[in-house]
Every structure is written in C-alpha cells, then in structure tokens.
Image (cartoon, rainbow, N blue to C red):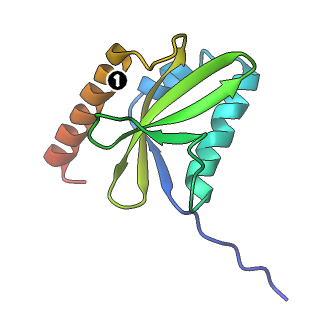
Amino acid sequence: MSVKEEPFQRTVFIYRNYFYDFYTKLDSKVKRKVDFVLGLVRDLKYIPEKFFKHIEGSEGMYELRIQAGRNSYRVFCFFDKRNVVVVINGFQKKTAKTPKTEINRAERIKKEYEHEKAERKY
C-alpha cells in the first residue's frame, strides 16, 4: 500500500532580499519559529489567525505572527494569484500596534513587486 502525499496548499515566494535581510539577523530559535509559521502557510488549508492575519485598512496585506519567548515578530506578505504567497519583509514588534511606518514600507515593496511583475509579465 502506498501513501499518497498531499500537495502543498500554497507556494511561498520570497521577493528580493528584504525578508532575508531581516531573517539572517535572527537567532536560531527565532529562525525555527519563522520557518514553522512559513510551513503552516504552505501546508495548511486553513491557517489559524494566531499565525496569519489580514492587516486592517490594507489592500490584501497579511502578517505572519511569530512569538518567541517574550519577543514578537511580524513578517509581511500578500497573495499573488490564488495560491502564491509573496513574502516581502519582517521586523521585531516592540509596540502593541503594528507601526504604520512598517505597514507603509510593506505596501511600497508590494507596489514594487507588482510594477516589476507587470514589466516582466511573469
């Protein structure tokens, strides 16, 4: 009897180095948590809001929510096509609300991605 592997629910695409610049500065424990949450996004049909939440007032922007000890981290992403999640940048959260400057930065990167995509037609 063979075991049928289920396909991934989504493809995770990391755009440019914005996310990597954030990720490479993290300690190994936090990196494992980030990897775990990215795996949930890729694998689960329904992602718990504890880990993946729409940012109110944004045009399709989401945040991956990572908790490591007393520290909180956020990674911004959005959907391209139906099942492609584009990961764009991250930061360590130090206030109760996500800073507007971080949301604005994520929105600028999203527009950059969309502009580049329209030019390359991929």
Q: Residue furthest bottom?
A: 1
Q: Position of residue 16 (x, y in %)?
A: 38, 31
Q: Judge from the rendering whether residue 95 lies leftward or rightward of residue 55; answer left or right.
A: right
Q: Residue at x 65, y 72 (%)?
A: 6
User: Residue 81 or 46: which is nearer the viewer?
Assistant: 46
When the figure is inspected, residue 88 is found, relative to residue 117, above or below; the finding is: above
Circle 1 sits in a helix, a strand or a loop, which is it?
helix
Pointer 1 local density, CA inside 10 Å: few below 14, some 14–19, many at least 20: some
**The C terminus, quarter of image:** bottom left
Q: Which residue is mark 1?
A: 103
Residue drawn 71% across and 17% down?
27
Total marks drawn? 1
Residue ranking furthest to the right: 1
Report the residue at 23% width, 32% height from top: 112
- Name the one closer to the observer, 65 or 20: 65
Three-letter code, disc 1: Ile
Residue 8, image x, y percentages: 58, 63
Examine the rendered structure and indicate whether residue 62 appears above or below residue 23.
Answer: below
Where residue 25 appears, x then y in whole percent? 60, 15
Residue 33 figure quarter: top right
Q: Is residue 56 left or right of residue 111?
A: right
> Which residue is pictured at 61% across the width and 20% down the height?
72
Identity of the residue furthest to the top in this view: 94
Q: Quadrant of the N terminus?
A: bottom right
